[in-house]
Amino acid sequence: MLSEYPFQLIIKNTYSKEHEELLLCKELLRYLPGKRKVFDAEWNNKDVIVKIFLDKFKAKHHLKREWTGLIKLNKRKLYGPKPLFFGRTENSDWAMVTEKIANSSTALEILEKNDNHNEKIDFLIMICKQLAKQHINGVLQKDLHMENFLFADNKIYTLDPGQIKFFAGHVPQNKCISQLALLTLYANDDSLSLTKIIRDEYLKNRGWELNHSLDALLHKQIKIQRQKTINHALKKCLRTSKRYTRIKTKDYTAVFDKRFCQEAQATDLIMKLDSLIIQGNILKDGNTCFVSRLLWNNNDIVVKRYNHKGFLHSLRHSIKKSRAYRVWLNAQRLGMLGILTAKPLAYIEKKKGFLIWNSYLITKYLEGTNLYNFIKNESLTEETRSITKQQLKELLDKLAEHHITHGDLKHSNILITKNGPALTDLDSMKKHIFSWTFNKGREKDLQHFK
């Protein structure tokens, strides 16, 4: 497949006409190695979407599943892209062409770009109504996420029909509640009031009455779905995906947020990183780590280098993963739970042979005052102190709810920002499986916090 755009693609139409169709592929929208490529294209002066199925053994099955899924959606009066034709490319790959929904955005894009809390709730309610409609019509998205809802002209379109299960009647209640729980997580808000708004809207659209067992099932599913979602997302932030780029050479392994920089820029940054941090505003120069704040490509960033401290030290961190790797995951987890911390932008592990020699964590600079200095400020009003105290209680409660301990929760590791308290220095943070280990870690955290 050509990598320069635009390029011409010929598909032998085996759906209806048995002749060749000529398309102009303008942009690669998505690439899943070994599975599929998705292109923004033009056909007969129409904007279309082309999916090329790459699995050598299952490509035809995947195509058939998506094609019949779109037809079933339309029959059940649910909006989906109109299927146009399918066939084989000159490379003998199976391909499917559908209409392109003009002036559209995914539900995820709308939620991420909109800072208005009330508008976000209104949009989630709209998605909630669509979800209820799907369930009533026997449609279950097995891979439910906000990128599979497309919004245009006040309509919500359903994407990825290959991951939809169709029922003869309504979707079973337990599966409905599981998906409702998943929807509440996209609010990125643990408030009971918001959960109730979404819950009540769904029940109203289904004509269901709320009872204790139904409410208990929903809250149980919220916990289950949150953990599943986070585990899935943590895996995605360690590999090349829509949002992240993973680079691996014999000298280093790195993962970068694509919104921070692309692969070519990332390689350049890695090569210059040691000299850049020395030239930056040095915040800490210790035996364990070196921390520097600097401006790179108009990004105000903080780079933390975990230093090499001998063969055994490197061997231990090569086996159990580097500190930068662990903090990268810890920061990602906190972000998913709505707990404020410096935004992680990249982590890098430099190697010598099979050993990790140095590791680096890059975060966005977070403006604020550490809690120790904040408390010492005599000019603070009692109202400000009271608000901050309540915010700190909520932070500690949220950590407890998710069985997370910080490991070094002293006042200097809590930053008071304009958006509330933020956690820093996540090197010792742990997500506990067992209650007894969490209780022990929690006690240690509270002792440091006092």
Image (cartoon, rainbow, N blue to C red):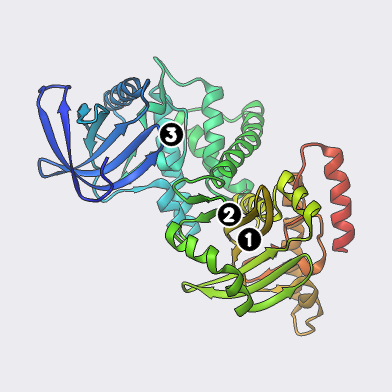
The location of residue 448, given as percent across then percent down, is 87, 61
Q: Which quadrant would the C terminus be assigned to in this image? A: bottom right
- Between the residue at mark 2 and the residue at mark 3, the CA separation in whole angstroms equals 48 Å
- Between the residue at mark 1 and the residue at mark 3, the CA separation in whole angstroms equals 39 Å
Labels 1 and 3 touching (C-beta < 8 A)? no
> Is 369 situated above or below 337?
below
Secondary-structure class at tag 1: strand
Between 423 and 240, the one lying in front of the other is 240
The location of residue 291, given as percent across then percent down, is 68, 70
Label 1: few (<14), some (14–19) or many (≥20) C-alpha neighbours in 10 Å: many
Name the residue: 51% across, 49% down: 246
Q: Which residue is mark 3?
A: 131
- Between the residue at mark 1 and the residue at mark 2, the CA separation in whole angstroms equals 17 Å
Q: Which quadrant would the N terminus be assigned to in this image? A: top left
The kind of residue tagged 3 is: Leu
**318 displayed left or right of 162:** right
The kind of residue tagged 2 is: Asp
The location of residue 393, given as percent across then percent down, is 77, 58
Between 291 and 189, the one lying in front of the other is 291
The kind of residue tagged 1 is: Leu
In this view, the mark in front (1 or 3): 1
Q: Which residue is mark 2?
A: 251
**421 displayed left or right of 136:** right
Q: Which residue is mark 1?
A: 361
> Is 182 situated above or below 326?
above
Label 3: few (<14), some (14–19) or many (≥20) C-alpha neighbours in 10 Å: many
